[in-house]
Amino acid sequence: MDLRDCRVGAERGEAIARAVHELGEGRLVVLPTDTVYGIAAGAHLPMAVRSLLRAKGRSRAKPPPVLVADTEQATGLVDRFSPAAQALVAALWPGPLTLVARVAAGIRWDLGDADGTVAIRVPDHGIARALLRASGPLAVSSANVAGEPPALTAHEAVAAFRDAVALYLDAGPAPGGLPSTVVDVTGRELRILRSGAIGADRIATVVGRAPVAGRPVAIGLRDRSTRRGVAAGQLASAANGADGP
């Protein structure tokens, strides 16, 4: 276990390089975001993702979201963004908005029982985005053990995970404190799966119509009220309330 202070510019580049190395070796890294601290694994490494879920005390039923550095990285991971989703991306990324979309056909990652979806966002945090530019997309869940509040400091994350995480990037207290708002954009209606830092009124202003509230369902099942596939793993995370930063 190693804790690196990223607030000092001279040490930031070395810490990010070390984080990229650890992630590439399949180990876990805690990183700051604009909302709360997150625990990260290489999204393309199934064993690393399993380690993340094990450290959290989560099962495959609650797959972690994916953080990316920019919109270009995001569009390479999703099947497509609807016009409403594109409007949200243009207005609210980078920022505390997670979008649940259908995953691109060529992506064969194993994040858990995600029912063909991926929850994705661009954080508004310089250190997080610098790491993501260097590492590529990361599976990132909020830095807390299941049932506990998310870490707002690196030291709170250390207390939660100890040696289960190889490297902790310390950027001081998390500036947001609230997790991201999660919105399902897989269907015609926008569905808020988890309330968070961005309110429904702001989303309605951007897209010109009010989103509807999603309802928690079991993982891997179909939402029979709408007869369409539910973003199953992400819906369960939304019901839990603190799985993604």
Image (cartoon, rainbow, N blue to C red):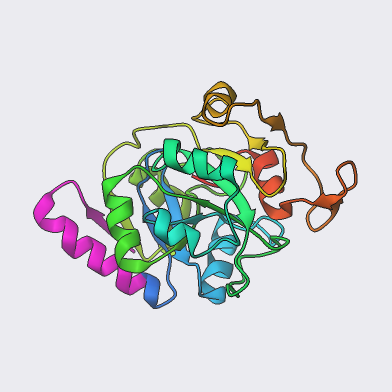
Question: Can you see residue 243?
Answer: no
| x, y percent for residue 119 | 58, 52
Q: Nearer the viewer, residue 29 or 148?
A: 29
Q: Residue at x 50, y 37 (%)?
A: 179
Which quadrant would the N terminus be assigned to in this image?
Answer: bottom left
| x, y percent for residue 164 | 46, 64
Q: Residue 91 falls in which quadrant of the image?
A: top left
Q: Residue at x 39, y 70 (%)?
A: 23
Q: Is residue 90 left or right of residue 235?
A: left
Secondary structure that dominates the magenta span? helix
Residue 26 lies, with reference to residue 75, above or below; the image says below
Q: Residue at x 37, y 66 (%)?
A: 166
Residue extending furthest toward the bottom: 25
Q: Is residue 152 left or right of residue 75?
A: left
Which stretch appears magenta? 1-22
On whether residue 18 falls in the magenta region, the answer is: yes
Q: Nearer the viewer, residue 74 or 216?
A: 74
| x, y percent for residue 197 | 49, 30
Question: Can you see residue 27?
Answer: yes
Q: Nearer the viewer, residue 116 or 186?
A: 186
Q: Residue 184 falls in which quadrant of the image?
A: top right
Total residue callouts: 0
On whether residue 6 falls in the magenta region, the answer is: yes
Q: Nearer the viewer, residue 52 or 221?
A: 221
Residue extending furthest toward the left: 10
Q: Is residue 240 left or right of residue 217?
A: left
| x, y percent for residue 122 | 42, 49
Residue extending furthest toward the right: 224
